[in-house]
Image (spheres, rainbow, N blue to C red):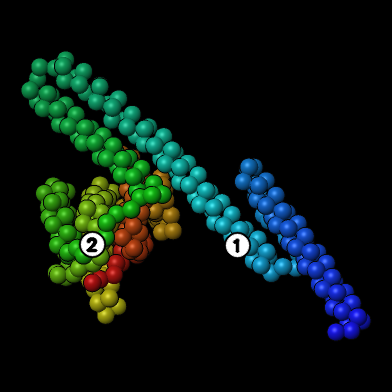
Amino acid sequence: MSESTYMTIIVVLTVLSLALVFILISLLSQMKSIRSQVHFISRNDTNKRLTFYGKSRGFQRLASDINEILDSYDARHEKILREDKEIKDTLTNMSHDIRTPLTSLKGYFELLELTEDPEERKKYSGIISGRIDSLSEILETMFLYTKVSNVNFKISIDPIDCSGIVLNTLFEYYDDFQDKGYTVDVDVDEGVKILGNEQSLKRIMQNLIRNSLVHGNGDVKIALKPIDDGKKVSICVENLMEEGQNPDVNKVFDRYYKGDASRHTGSSGVGLSVVKKLVESMNGEIKAVVEGRKFKIIMTFKTI
């Protein structure tokens, strides 16, 4: 090998070495910049995102991935804060609902102690019993709403007899419908099964049936029918509304919405909100429909 060739190789290797050193220094500088920004973001309450102006595609993708993680974290954090505020607001409002029956209970107990008349004692005892039932329902709903509003709330999903649960729950309220003088039109296909949770579906039906009993203004219809060639099942609970009611179907599942057939004095105000959360926890869908004086809650679940 001639001396000129040897010198050429040395020069080329030196240039390559210097270029690699320059690239390495540049990459280390870019890495330091990203690390410094991550360090700042992790220790401060900020919406800042990583900025990267280098030419390294690898570092560009890394900065982009970190920004996606930050966006996802912020979204989850905002959701947790929003749901926490909703729960606190709900508990505050429901505490006022609890105060009403408690205050009246004290008054009626005093009247009960003062009277010796059997008829009056019977009347006051009946009122007290009703107030206690109302208080129990509010407390139970409060507990359930807090439970289902938790971001970590999950239920077990198993094959369940949808038709049987709907019919059995409806039968539990037979006497209540009789006392109201309501006729119940039942159109339920038997043997329909879904992937869901038995206790959750029962609670859903209890809330909807109570809603019809307490806030409806006439006969009730409950239908359960397979749809989409049997791939899904539709459950519809329908009742008549009072004259002049015109609820906003886009808001009926909001907490304390006052313009629908479900929010009246004595209601905890979160019944349909709980129903919606339970339906969605079973991967179902729910909507409200108004047709004239008919108020309908329609749910769909996948069959098995």
Helix, strand or loop at label 2? It is strand
Q: Quadrant of the N terminus?
A: bottom right
Q: Residue at x 25, y 47 (%)?
A: 214
Q: Is residue 188 left or right of residue 275?
A: left
Determine the residue located farthest toward the left in the rendered image.
118
93 or 302: nearer the viewer: 302
Q: Secondary structure at mark 1?
A: helix
Tag 1 and tag 2, C-beta contact below 8 Å: no
Query: Residue 126 location in percent, x, y?
Result: 15, 31
Hey, which quadrant is residue 50 in on the image? Answer: bottom right
**Residue 65: numbered disc:** 1
Look at mark 2 in the image and give the residue it sits on: 158
Q: Is residue 258 visible?
A: no
Of all residues, the one furthest to the right in this rendering is 4
Nearest to viewer (mark 1 / mark 2): 1
Q: Residue 234: where, in percent of width, then height?
A: 27, 68
Q: State left or right for residue 267 relative to residue 92.
A: left
Residue 101 visible in the snapshot? yes
Q: Is residue 201 left or right of residue 83?
A: left
Indicate the quadrant where residue 123 lies: top left
> Which amino acid type is marked by label 2?
Asp
